Image (cartoon, rainbow, N blue to C red):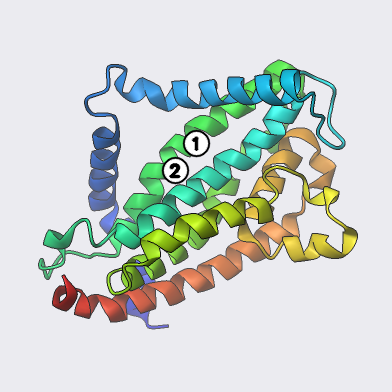
Amino acid sequence: MSPHLLLEFSPWRYRRLIWQFARKDIVLRYRGSLLGGAWSVLSPLIMLAIYTFVFQFVLHSKWPDGHDSTLDYSLNLYAGLLIFNWFAECLGRAPRLILEQPYLVNKVIFPLHVLGWTAAISTGIQMFVSLAIWLFAALLTGYSPTFLMLLLPLLPILLLPWLLALIWSLSSVGVFLRDLSQLLPILTTGLMFLSPVLYPIKALPEVLQNVAYLNPLSSTIEGLRSIAFHPADLNILSIVLSFVIGVVFAMLALKLFDRLSSNFSDVL
C-alpha cells in the first residue's frame, strides 16, 4: 500500500470539505419539513415507542436472558436496528453516490473519495442521536450506569472502516454496473436476518455462534448490548479483530476506487 493511499485514507486532510458536504446532506434531508432537524430526535423516539407496543404489549415477547421490564425486548431489538439501519442506509446510497453527482467527476482537483466519508458521517449522525436515546431509555428502565457505557460511542466508530470499504467499492463499481441499485435492497433484507438484530448470538446453535461473528455487524451490535446490559459478556477480541480486518478491506476498497475513478468520466 503506497504512502499516498494511506494519506488519502485519513479524513483529516479533507476534514473541512467532508464536514461541508455532510452538513449540506443533513440540511437537504430535512429541508421543507415543518419540524426540520427535530425529526432526528422524534424519529427514533417514535420507533422505540412502536417497538415497545408491538413486541411487549401485542406479541408479549421476551428477550433471552433479559429482564422482565417493559422496554427490555424493545431495547435489545433497537440496539440491533440502530446499527443495521446505519449500515443499510450507507449500503443503499453507495451505488448511486457518484452517479448522483456527475458534475464533481469532471473537477480534476476534487477528491471523489471524500464522498464516502460524507455518506458515512451524515447518516451516522442520525445513528448517534438514536444511540443516545437508546441509552437514556435503558437507564430510565432500570439498568445501572457503568463506566463501560462511556465506550458506547466508540463501537459504531470501530465499524466505520467496514462502511467505508463497502461505500468505496460499491460506488466505484456502481458507475459501471447500474443493476447494483436494484440488487442491494434484496441482499440487505437477507442480511438483516443473518445479523443478530432480531435475536442475540447466544440464541444460535453453539456451532454457528463463531460463524456469526464473521459478520462485521455482529461485534458492534452484541458489543452495544453487552456494555449496556451484560458487561461480563463483552467480546473485546471480536471487536478488535473486526476493526483491524475492516481497515484492511477499506484500504483495498480505496485502492479499487482510485483505480476505477480515472474511467468515471468516460461513462458519465
Q: Secondary structure at mark 2?
A: helix
The residue indicated by pointer 1 is 128
Measured along the vertical axis of the image, is residue 136 above or below residue 156? above
Image quadrant in which you'd find residue 241: bottom right
| Cα gap from disc 2 to disc 1, whole angstroms | 6 Å
Residue pictured at 44% horizontal, 35% vertical:
126
Q: Is residue 58 left or right of residue 124?
A: right
Q: Quadrant of residue 68?
A: top right
Q: Residues within 10 Å of mark 2 (few under 14, many from 20)?
A: many
Q: Is residue 70 visible?
A: yes
Residue at the spot 84% in from the left edge and 49% down from the top edge: 202
Which quadrant does the N terminus fall into?
Answer: bottom left
Q: Quadrant of the C terminus?
A: bottom left
- Asked which secondary structure carries label 1, the reply is helix
Residue 39 vs residue 236, the one in the foreground: 39
Foreground of the two, 235 or 215: 215
Residue type indicated by callout 2: Gly
**Residue drawn at point x = 25 percent, y = 75 percent:** 261
Question: Where is residue 239 drawn, in percent x and y?
Answer: 67, 57
Residue 157 position, x and y percent, is: 52, 50
Answer with left or right where residue 68 lies relative to residue 6. Answer: right
* Above or below, 157 relative to 151: below
> x, y (%) of residue 25?
27, 42
| Front-lying residue, 65 or 250 | 65
Q: Nearer the viewer, residue 8 or 120?
A: 120
Binning the other alpha carbons within 10 Å of mark 1 as few (below 14), some (14 to 19) or many (20 upward) gives some
Callout 1 amino acid: Phe
Q: Position of residue 173 (x, y in %)?
A: 35, 73
Which residue is denoted by mark 2 in the rendering?
124
Q: Are marks 2 and 1 in contact (CB under 8 Å)?
A: yes
